[in-house]
Image (cartoon, coloured by chain):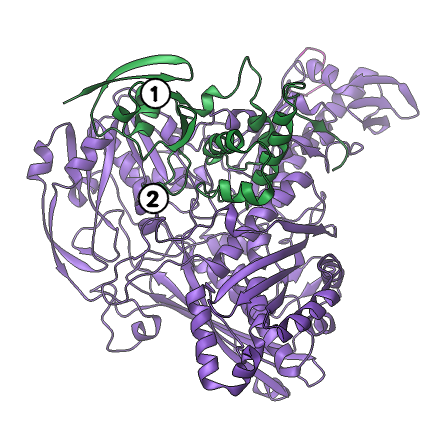
Amino acid sequence: MAVTTMIGAKIHRREDPRLVSGEGRYVDDFTRPGMVFLAVVRSPFAHALVKSIDVTQATKAPGVVAVYTHKDFTKVLSGTMPVTPSFVAEKKQTPPRFPIAEKEVVYQGEPVAVVLAETKYQAADASNLIDVEYEQLPAVMDLDKALEAKSPKVHVDGPDNLGWDLTYIPDDPAVMKEAEVVIKERILQQRLAPTSMETRGVLAEYSKPDGTMTVWMSSQSPHFVRLFLGGAMGIPENRLRVISPDVGGGFGAKISPYSEDWLVPAAAKLSGRPVKWIESRTESLLTTTHGRGQEFEVEAGAKKDGTLVYIKATQYLDIGAYMGTFAAFQACACLLAGGAYNWKHVAARTVGVLTNRVPTDPYRGAGRPEATHLCERAIDLLAGALKMDPAEIRRKNFITAFPHTNHFGLVFDSGAYEKAMDMAMEIAGYEKLRKEQEEGRKKGKYIGIGMSSWIEICGFGPSAATAPATGGIALVESAQVRVFPTGSVAVYVGTHSHGQGHDTTFPQIVADTLGVPYDSIELRHGDTAEGPAFGYGTYGSRSLAVGGMAVHKASKKVVDKARKIAAHLFEAAEEDVAFDQGHFYIKGSPDKRKAFGEVAFASYGAGLPEGMEQGLEAVAYYDPSNFVWPFGTHIAVVEVDVQTGHVDLKRYIAVDDCGNIINPMIVDGQIHGGVAQGISQALYEEIIYDNESGQMRTGTFTDYLVPSANEFPKFELGRTITPSPTNELGVKGIGEAGTIASSAAIINAVCDALSPFGIKHVDMPASPDRVWKQIHEAHAGSNHGKEAHK
Amino acid sequence: MKHKVATTVNGHRHEHEVEPRLLLVHYLRDVVGLTGTHIGCDTSQCGACTILVDGKAVKSCTMFAVQAEGKKLTTIEGMAKDGELHPLQQAFWDEHGLQCGYCTPGFIMAAAYLLEQNPNPTEDEIRRGLEGNLCRCTGYVNIVKSVQAAAKTMGGARAKPAGQPAVTAGGE
């Protein structure tokens, strides 16, 4: 590689001038001639039979072009919506899902009909005129009850409500007996709405004469949509173009294809008109996949000296009414239950439970925040039982030798866990904080200090591991680097940037590899008509460690060809030609040189080496040898008002290590956003359903609390750099780290603050209501609490 | 029945016949054709649709187009002058105050009004002043920094216009 000049530099984002000027182009900003608007009629019930649908009035309403129901869509759509086998091999049942209900609706918000009209107001008006007769059925909402033999079923024709049940590693009673101190806790991971600020949206245009379909969609993975949609509609990939333009956030909820991703293109084909649908916020909260939705039974044991012995986790996962495309991925919480520590034994089992709720699927972190939360809570509970400082029990048990193979056969590539923890403690002023805490308690001031030493598996992923899990598609990544005759460069990638800044960071990599000016490189993504045949998309903190490496690999292929041409021009042997800072020269005589641009121009001309074709461009697919493993330690400082139960987050310290860094400004930004989402889970957000009726109670932003700037402090960041040995760039991933780390730090701090009351665990969100009740109950049940509160 | 509405948007006069129920944000996006003003919720919480109405920050999803009769409206498209970004736009760029960019126009418009009211806000005042706008990407850290930076520039703006973006190679 050339001498690094751009990698590691704080380059301001080149996408920003258009975004700050109102010139971003999101799906709703596109229109097509003759376009109509689609409104979806949705089930108001969590579970019901559809007895009849009367569309007479709606069809006659002003501006209405068409009304379609299940029977219309079966003319242009076939098969069921995709579900990957994922990591759960012993899956018991995957309820078949067609994008629109026929005879039974199984969650509130499931589509039953659509209306096409000339304006969005007319479509909305007419959708209210569709008369659907339902027969309500009992809604299955509670995970425990759902598994009872006498429980009503989520699908009337289903065998039962068990989605899957898989024991990864069973108990080892001999080892478990060695523990001298044992803790047990049931830990809740409430349902969350991923809540990108731009909701989902689809615009589709079908050309009957050409048999071509163009779809604009707010998606993290347009190639996957093309693959699945093409299959469902019988349109080959060369006639189906999916464009994911500027996308206003994804957070995992824009990976999987949705009902509307099928229904809108299908309606365009049925009606012969371009069709647009934009999700409302209420539709989003009701029907976009939720995250988390799990309960864990956690048990852990240690020796009296603090040596960890075993941890055992049982995951009960609320699948919802259908299995989300990547739902089973969330079971990876089990595989990381041991966290950053050496345990003699780790036992894990995952149980997927069907309910009459919207499906869960990946949300920022997907399984890894849950793993961190259960493990870091268990560590603090053990520390409490052993009367050890939480930092000391961590220090004593950290994994220190790398590569490290965990109990599930996953290989941690590199790490320096203690170093990150030490830095976080130094920034926090840990010893001083503990003194302040002690002083505070004497005055009735309840300060809590919480720590989370997180690890993450990301960079999905090696083909050998991912292809069986996805049903055959390896999660490798592609890139194409194209050098034009006058030396400007276009780079096409299969990842999609929706805030991550790839337009800036990928050209930084290319600039260094090709040694050409950063400004001469243009990045293009999100249009399946351009670049390599297949791209795998952006999720799982994979874009840099997999996609960035594909960019690097394609750039190197270009340099290799250019070197051959340079050698030919020099009339020298290829091995005598060196390349540095964008120039080729003969080794030992750096004066005799040719700029990369000169060689690019020559590559399109005559007189190339014998047998060489014209042109200077290359496609690369990069298949990583392993996942990558970022890590770090976060520390939260809270003060709990024991009169009101309000948790005030005073400080938040995050020390993260994601290997080598391409652009520190963007890394910090990813951490900020991730941390905020984890704090939101810990303190604010929760999707709530009425457990009797199955009705969602949090269907607008008035009920679902997305925090504003006023709910957060400034975050204090630190960084260690431990390069990844997995790839040539030495990079890991940072997109999800903040979220993976932060919920545990907050809840550990809240529990630490409330320890004088004998409170050991607080579930999320630690809302004033929940915290106040727990303090109140502790008061009632314990003299110790009373004393503490004096 | 349609109603006549005449507005001045970013200095340009517009006259249209619109349904009385047409929301101002839909008027701007679908009738006037300015798509920089975004929609992020149905209930006036997110602030993505914030614009200035006669200089005052307003969530344009809470007003009907007909209520804007005779008003001067400023949207994000009207912030840059003579090809030069507004100091707030420049500051959001410089301070990495945006990621996906969807909430950004609303934040810039809300911040413009905030700085109009309070040219030198404290961090706390900025956080409270922008609590009607939601961002899901940034954790608000760099949004606060952007507004602080813009306040500084605008305080000295009379002497020194916003410069070109920094491309600082070689380190933080």
Chain letter of disc 2 in the image: A
Measured in 3D between alpha carbons, the distance from the residue under mark 2 to the one under mark 1, in whole angstroms, is 29 Å
The answer to whether residue A744 is seen in the rendering is no
How far from the left and from the top, in percent, is residue A131?
10, 46
Decide if residue A249 is in sight here.
yes
Name the residue type under label 1: Lys
- Residue at (74%, 52%) from the top-left corner? A720
Q: Secondary structure at mark 1?
A: loop
Of the residues tagged 2 and 1, which is closer to the observer? 1
Across and down, in percent, residue A506 comes to 63, 34
Say which residue label 2 marks.
A281
Q: Residues within 10 Å of mark 1 (few under 14, many from 20)?
A: some
Is residue A78 within the magenta segment? no
Q: Residue furthest top?
A: A606
Q: Quadrant of the C terminus of chain A?
A: bottom right
* Horizontal relation, residue A199 to residue A615: left or right: left
Is residue A176 depicted above or below A563 in this figure? below
The residue that appears at 53% across and 16% down in the rendered structure is B81
Q: Nearer the viewer, residue A646 or A587?
A: A646
Q: Is residue A653 left or right of residue B2?
A: right
Q: Which residues, given as a range, are shown in magenta?
A: A605-613
**In the image, which lettered chain appears purple?**
A
Please tell me the numbered disc located at residue B71.
Answer: 1
User: Chain B shown in which color?
Assistant: green
Q: Residue at 33% x, 34% y: name it.
A: B61
